[in-house]
């Protein structure tokens, strides 16, 4: 009787698994760099440069940035999770595949970098970037963005060579809660305006 019951239970278990829907693998995104180049020429180049190197300190350079980070930010602009009236309009017609392709396009471009214009300010920035500020609880930026500022793909963005003005603007946005990231909101809240400018100045010349 026990053997019969065991067989019945075994068959019942098989029936349960047999009736479960098969796991469906997520659809692979279609990367079309040629299409991305067309979008860049028509839409992105005016602010970010055709090769991802912006000519204006108000607009970030995207060349060499991690593909998944760019795609994520475009997705956030489109969903409204990241607020920017200009970018909301730019991404309105982009598909997920377009955003993925744009990430790959810019990631493959070479960053021309920048340079620090104020050595003394950059020196203070280096101290904070590499060692943080223990007295105010500011962690070292290098811990997440790497000592050379290249970041960690899919986790933390590349910062090296970015315009100081743009970096300061983003730190202020994190401080004000206009950009939502728990870690960066906390870090920016502990930075003084001078420290923000110092870190940004150092990052501009970081290679």
Image (cartoon, grey):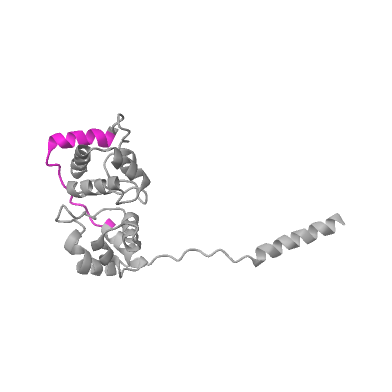
Q: Which residue occupies the extreme right position in the image? A: 1
Which sits in the foreground, 107 or 39?
39
Image quadrant holding the N terminus, namely: bottom right
Which x, y percent locates residue 22? 58, 65
In terms of image quadrants, where is residue 76?
Answer: bottom left
Does residue 24 show up magenta in the picture?
Answer: no
Q: Residue at x 18, y 51 (%)?
A: 112
Image quadrant holding the C terminus, namely: top left
Residue 49 visible from this viewpoint: no
Which x, y percent locates residue 61? 21, 54
Which x, y percent locates residue 11? 75, 62
Q: Which residue occupies the extreme left position in the image? A: 117
Which sits in the foreground, 86 or 42?
86
Along the horizontal axis of the image, is 111 left or right of 8? left
Q: Residue at x 33, y 54 (%)?
A: 69
Along the horizontal axis of the image, is 120 left or right of 85? left
Q: Is residue 176 above or below residue 93?
A: above
In terms of image quadrants, where is residue 142?
Answer: top left
Q: Which residue occupies the extreme top position in the image? A: 135
Magenta residues?
Answer: 107-130
Does residue 113 show up magenta in the picture?
Answer: yes
Q: Residue at x 28, y 53 (%)?
A: 65
Q: Residue at x 20, y 67 (%)?
A: 41
């Amino acid at each position: 009787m026990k053997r019969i019951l065991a067989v019945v239970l075994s068959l019942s278990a098989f029936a349960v698994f047999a009736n479960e829907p098969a796991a469906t693998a997520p659809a692979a995104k279609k990367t079309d760099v040629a299409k991305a180049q067309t979008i860049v020429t028509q839409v992105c180049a005016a602010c970010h440069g055709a090769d991802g190197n912006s000519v204006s300190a108000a607009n970030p350079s995207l060349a060499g940035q991690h593909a998944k980070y760019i795609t994520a930010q475009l997705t956030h602009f489109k969903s409204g999770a990241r607020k920017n009236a200009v970018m909301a309009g730019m991404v309105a017609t982009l598909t997920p595949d377009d955003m993925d392709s744009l990430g790959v396009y810019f990631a493959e471009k070479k960053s021309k970098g920048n340079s620090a214009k104020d050595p003394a300010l950059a020196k203070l920035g280096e101290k904070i970037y590499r060692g943080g500020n223990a007295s105010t609880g500011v962690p070292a930026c290098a811990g997440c963005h790497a000592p050379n500022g290249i970041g960690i793909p899919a986790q933390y963005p590349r910062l090296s060579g970015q315009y100081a003005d743009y970096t300061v603007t983003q730190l202020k946005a994190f401080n004000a809660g206009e950009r939502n990231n728990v870690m960066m909101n906390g870090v920016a809240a502990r930075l003084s305006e001078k420290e923000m400018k110092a870190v940004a100045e150092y990052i501009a010349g970081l290679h």
